[in-house]
Image (cartoon, grey):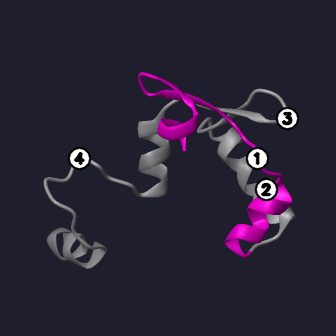
Amino acid sequence: LCREQGNLEGDTCKVEITITQAEMASRIGSTREVVCRSLAHLEEDGLIQSQGPRVMQIPSMQALGNFAGVHHDLDEPRVVSELSAEIA
């Protein structure tokens, strides 16, 4: 979303949110309350920053990706079971 519609500067992204929390919840099969709490936790952890009712800033795309379990630094994509086998 940041790369397509946001303002990406280095590792920081600012994006306008064009749907409501209720619409987000509906798209992921959840409730508005869960979306609201999840966004609040992300903000408390410093992974996102609300900049008004419709603007969200992600101070570090790397940190958010790490939190979400997204790793773009692999030589080739692998499934979690392959990575888990290497750790064990």
Identity, as a three-letter code, of the amino acid under mark 4: Asp
Q: What separation in Å lies between label 1 and label 4 (alpha carbons)?
A: 28 Å
Identity, as a three-letter code, of the amino acid under mark 1: Ala
Identity, as a three-letter code, of the amino acid under mark 2: Arg
Q: Residue at (18%, 77%) from the top-left corner? A: 85
Residue 27: which numbered mark, if any? none
* Marks 2 and 1 close (CB-CB < 8 Å): yes
Residue numbers of the magenta segment: 1-29
Q: What separation in Å lies between label 2 and label 1 (alpha carbons)?
A: 5 Å
Identity, as a three-letter code, of the amino acid under mark 3: Pro
Residue 37: which numbered mark, if any? 2
Element assignment for label 1 = helix
* Marks 2 and 3 close (CB-CB < 8 Å): no
Residue 73: which numbered mark, if any? 4
* Marks 4 and 2 close (CB-CB < 8 Å): no
Element assignment for label 3 = loop
| Residue at the extreme front of the image, as rendered | 4
